[in-house]
Image (tube, rainbow, N blue to C red):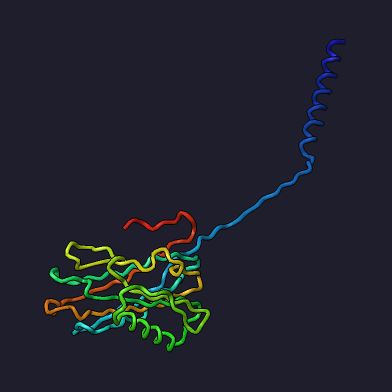
Amino acid sequence: MKKLKKTFLGTALVGALIIGGGLGTYSWFTAESTAAGALVNGSLSLGEMEQLFDHQQFAPSQLLYSEWQTINNTGDLDQILRATYTHEINKNDVNIDKYKVGYTALKYKEKPDEDVLDDQKYELEKLLDGTTNPINPMSVDSADVEVVTGLLIDEEGTALSNDNSSKTITLGDGDEFWTLDSDEYIEIVFGVKLTEEAGNNYQGVQYDAEFKVEAKQTDDGAEYGSD
């Protein structure tokens, strides 16, 4: 009798295993949700500029215009600009301040006509013919063009040498004009005049200049690197 019970228990166990194994083949209700994305960084870049000027036999009272330089936002991010003008002479016993430098700059989305640019050069000529302080921003016959004109004067400059033969000057530091949206341009021309007070010790002197423009993003906390 005991032997028969053992046989029944074994049969029951096998049946339970078969039923349990069958449960694993059934499907359960399920659901899922996913989100994906991609992030592409913007670009911050400026177009190339041309040579400022190349001239021989410069003399006191003469005025030389640079070529028009186009500051072009070629990236897709808005920019804050830092523009500097560095000039130097290759003689230590004369002062670079005898070279008076002025500029006129136009900011636009569509380039103005050539006669507008010529008019601004005329305004710059008047500025360099005796005026000693920067003038207020001017206007042109177009609501889409913003113009600033000024002199790069002594007080704005940082001397690069003890003998005042070289100096760097910042144009409109922190000024709202020196920003560029992704579809804006700045056109700028410089005028250099050797004043009448420059004596014979300026003969044969070479004058070199560099106009440099840096750009950074407009977000708070973005800073220029140290010089």
Q: Give residue 8's position: percent from left, percent from top.
A: 85, 19
- Of the pair 223 and 104, the residue shown nearer to us: 104
- Kindly give the residue lying farthest to the top in the view shown: 1
Q: Give residue 41's position: percent from left, percent from top.
A: 51, 60
- Of the pair 21 and 150, the residue shown nearer to us: 150
Q: Is residue 192 above or below residue 43?
A: below
- Of the pair 146 and 223, the residue shown nearer to us: 146
Q: Is residue 222 above or below residue 149?
A: above
In-image side of 35 versus 224 (left or right): right
Quarter in which the C terminus is drawn: bottom left
Does the rendering let one see residue 136?
Answer: yes
Quarter in which the N terminus is drawn: top right
Q: Give residue 12's position: percent from left, percent from top.
A: 83, 23
> Which residue is rendered at x = 15% and y = 71% of the image?
94
- Kindly give the residue lying farthest to the right in the view shown: 1
In-image side of 73 versus 131 (left or right): right
- Kindly give the residue lying farthest to the bottom in the view shown: 115
Q: Give residue 139's position: percent from left, percent from top.
A: 46, 80
Residue 91 lies in what quarter of the image?
bottom left
